[in-house]
Amino acid sequence: MLSAPPTDLAEFKGAFQARIARQADVWFKDGEFPKAVHLLRARAETVPSDYEAWTDLGWMASNIELWDEAEAIYRRFAQANPGDPDRRLPLIQFFDNRKRYADTIREFGPSVTDAKAHPNHWRLLARAYEKESRIDDSIRVWNEYLKGHPADETAKANLRRVTAKRDAAKG
C-alpha cells in the first residue's frame, strides 16, 4: 500500500530528499558510484543550503577520486551559504584528508574569524600549522580556540603537546 502523498511543500521537499538519499545509498552499495554522484548532485542543487546533501556529494566524489570535482563541490557550498558559520568546514576537512596543509593555511589562516564556527575549524587549522612546522602558529590557534572553549580538555592536551614539541625543538 502506498503512503499518503505529502500535503505541503515542506513535507514534499523532505520526502523528496529522503527518497534521493535512499536511492543514492542503494547505488553506492551496488557500486554504481557515478549514478550516486549524479543523484546526490540533484539533491544538493535542490536545496543549496543542505549541508548534508553537499557533504554527501563531496564525499562521494572523493570516494571515486574525483578530487577536483570534490573540491569544487565544497567551494560551491561555501560560496552559496555565506551566513553559515560552518560553510567552509567541508573544504578544510577535504584539505586535511588530502594532507594539503599549506592549502588549509592559505585559505583559512591566519585564524578562524567566526566565533560561532564548529570547533573543528580551529582544530584543523592548528593541525595544519603543526604539520607545516609552524608550531608557534599552531600554539596561537589553540590559545585562540581555548579562549572561547576553556573546558575543552582535548584542546588543552593538544596545546600542551604542541608546546612541548616546540620546547623540545629549542633544546
Image: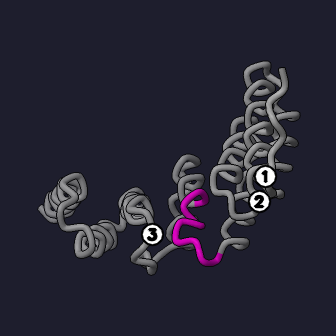
Residue at point 84%, 40% (across, down): 5
Query: Residue 117 bears which disc, if any?
Result: 3
Q: Decide: marks 1, 2 in contact (CB < 8 A)?
A: yes
How many C-alpha atoms fall within 10 Å of the one at disc 3: few (<14), some, or many (≥20)? some
Given residues 140 and 18, the one toward you in this image is 18
Q: Of the residues tagged 1 and 2, which is closer to the observer?
A: 1
Q: Of the residues tagged 3 and 1, which is closer to the observer?
A: 1
Q: Separation of disc 2 and disc 3 at Cα?
A: 21 Å
Q: Position of residue 132 (x, y in %)?
A: 42, 61
Q: Position of residue 166 (x, y in %)?
A: 20, 63
Residue at point 54%, 61% (across, down): 89
Identified by mark 3, the residue type is: Ala
Determine whether the residue tagged by mark 1 lies in a helix, strand or loop: helix
Prevailing secondary structure class for the magenta stretch in the rendered image: loop
Marks counted in the figure total: 3
- Could you tell which of marks 2 and 3 lies nearer the N-terminus? 2
- Could you tell which of marks 3 and 1 lies nearer the N-terminus? 1
Q: Which residues are magenta?
A: 82-91
Identified by mark 2, the residue type is: Val
Identified by mark 1, the residue type is: Lys
Q: Separation of disc 1 and disc 2 at Cα?
A: 9 Å
Determine whether the residue tagged by mark 3 lies in a helix, strand or loop: loop
Q: Separation of disc 3 and disc 1 at Cα?
A: 27 Å
The residue where tag 1 is placed is 13
Can you say whether 34 is above or below 91 in the image? above
The residue where tag 2 is placed is 47
